[in-house]
């Protein structure tokens, strides 16, 4: 029997299993008994990210180096917002940030801040874009907010049609609204269509005010990397240029992928999630700024905390959380413990496996590849003759459900151009071509069985 990577239980079954764990009582429970209860109720329903059959999302099991840093984080419970609460933690975040800028080849003026997620990093980037644009326009955004603009409905953000849904969160939470999020069509490679961008910029001229344009370096649906340098060259100088590299930016460290990120030094800000490929414990996201001084737009001071006269490192002045974990440490222990050569090799492995899978799948009858992978994601369709487009989408969902019900492997679906497709997403080096091929064969067998 194939090993299960999770229980395969339904939501109702998981809820029933977990009920004893949240049935709080007046009397406590010995640690050993509590551990046993967790083992019985919760653990079977957690996903084994370290198993090669986990091929659906960006989660990664923390390596030993990450666990070392995480254990110190847990044991010391350091808040690292500023020097007052943790001299070593605050200084480590500052130094690690500069070292990361150097690792990715960013400008000497660049800096970064650690954040709770890529969603919040993208939101802060767009906030910085609006804030800088307000300064350029002579608008008091700090005190007046969006209402200080003569016509806030004119402010728009440009993104790819395949951009992450966190961009929708960002414009909602910042008060722009989704009507001010302009989606640019993608080309046949699922990258932002530069010709469409040029046309839309022309259409918006005089009608709207573009405050930010976003390139996605590794879309979450297909892993496509938008062409950064041509896009940057096309944008007027007053537009904040952001790269959402939450998933894909790590692949800049892979020599065979580095060309995809040409021009990243031109971006005003870049989002990256080390908790994906590197397995850094969540939360662990980073927001880079080409000019570290831009983080000054986030700075708030108080009489007792983050005082304006303080000269020591205060990471909390660069992003909102007043209480922030020592997220830099596990990332440091990963990079230092593994070494850059090993990390580069591990990053390259799933990319190569996915490309090999795509090439092989193109030779298989009954399957259609939706795109050639830039990174570690591949979308495809299992065909069934005689089905309409809507029926074919429902069939992909049927296949997905059947695969997941076994608990033996985890794949995913996504929507491309209104149609449901199957999707592999791999971030760990343990998953090879043979593991992905085995999933294809499992899907093929389910499809054959359904025809009988």
Image: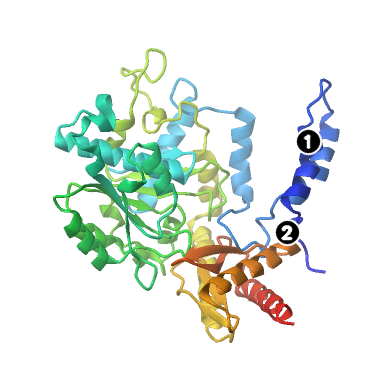
Would residue 441 be found to the left or right of residue 235 on screen?
Answer: right
Q: Nearer the viewer, mark 1 or mark 2?
A: 1
User: Can residue 253 be seen from the camera position used here?
Assistant: yes
Where residue 21 is drawn, which disc sits there?
1
**Which quadrant of the structure image shows residue 288?**
top left
**Which quadrant of the structure image shows residue 111?**
top left
How far apart marks 1 and 2 lie (CA) works out to 22 Å
Q: How far across and down, in percent of the image, does residue 225 sit?
A: 38, 63
Residue at 69%, 74% (x, y): give it.
Answer: 442
Residue at 68%, 78% (x, y): give it.
Answer: 447
Point out the image quarter for the N terminus.
bottom right
Where residue 5 is drawn, which disc sits there?
2
Q: How far across and down, in percent of the image, does residue 192 sit?
A: 33, 64
Image position of 92 with respect to 450: above or below: above
Identify the secondary structure beneath mark 2.
loop
Would residue 34 be found to the left or right of residue 129 on screen?
Answer: right
Outermost residue, top side: 303
| Depth order, front residue of 284/413 | 413
User: Can residue 292 be seen from the camera position used here?
Assistant: no
Identify the secondary structure beneath mark 1.
helix
Q: How far across and down, in percent of the image, does residue 404 sit?
A: 69, 62
Point out the image quarter for the C terminus.
bottom right
């Amino acid at each position: 029997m194939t090993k299960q990577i999770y229980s395969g239980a339904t939501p109702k079954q998981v809820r029933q299993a977990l009920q004893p764990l949240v049935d709080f009582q007046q009397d406590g429970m010995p640690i050993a008994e509590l551990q046993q209860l967790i083992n019985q109720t919760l653990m079977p329903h957690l996903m084994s990210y370290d198993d090669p059959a986990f091929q659906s999302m960006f989660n990664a099991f923390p390596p030993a180096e990450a666990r070392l840093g995480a254990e110190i984080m847990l044991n010391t419970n350091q808040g690292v917002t500023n020097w007052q609460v943790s001299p070593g933690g605050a200084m480590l975040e500052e130094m690690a940030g500069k070292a990361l800028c150097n690792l990715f080849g960013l400008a000497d003026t660049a800096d970064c801040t650690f954040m709770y997620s890529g969603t919040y990093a993208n939101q802060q980037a767009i906030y910085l874009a609006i804030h800088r644009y307000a300064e350029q326009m002579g608008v008091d955004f700090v005190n007046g907010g969006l209402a200080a603009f003569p016509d806030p409905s004119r402010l728009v953000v440009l993104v790819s049609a395949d951009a992450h849904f966190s961009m929708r969160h960002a414009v909602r939470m910042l008060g722009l609204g989704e009507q001010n999020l302009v989606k640019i069509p993608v080309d046949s490679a699922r990258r932002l269509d530069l010709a469409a961008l040029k046309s839309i910029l022309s259409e918006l001229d005089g009608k709207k005010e573009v405050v930010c344009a976003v390139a996605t370096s590794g879309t979450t649906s297909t892993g496509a990397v938008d062409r950064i340098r041509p896009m940057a060259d096309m944008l007027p100088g007053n537009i904040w240029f952001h790269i959402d590299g939450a998933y894909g930016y790590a692949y800049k460290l892979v020599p065979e992928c580095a060309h995809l990120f040409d021009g990243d030094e031109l971006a005003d800000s870049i989002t990256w999630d080390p908790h994906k490929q590197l397995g850094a414990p969540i939360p662990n996201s980073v927001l880079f700024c080409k000019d570290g001084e831009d983080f000054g737009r986030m700075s708030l001071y108080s009489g007792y905390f983050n005082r304006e006269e303080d000269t020591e490192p205060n990471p909390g002045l660069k992003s909102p959380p007043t209480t922030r974990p020592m997220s830099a440490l596990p990332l440091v222990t990963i990079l230092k413990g593994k070494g850059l050569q090993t990390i580069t090799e591990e990053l390259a492995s799933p990319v190569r496996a996915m490309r090999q899978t795509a090439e092989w799948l193109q030779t298989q009858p009954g399957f259609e590849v939706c795109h050639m992978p830039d990174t570690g994601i591949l979308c495809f369709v299992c065909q069934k003759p005689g089905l309409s487009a809507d029926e074919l989408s429902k069939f992909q969902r049927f296949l997905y459900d059947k695969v997941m019900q076994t608990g033996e492997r985890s794949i995913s679906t996504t929507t491309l151009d209104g149609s449901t497709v199957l999707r592999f997403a791999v971030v760990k080096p343990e998953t090879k071509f043979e593991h992905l091929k085995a999933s294809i064969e499992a899907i093929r067998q389910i499809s054959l069985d359904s025809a009988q």
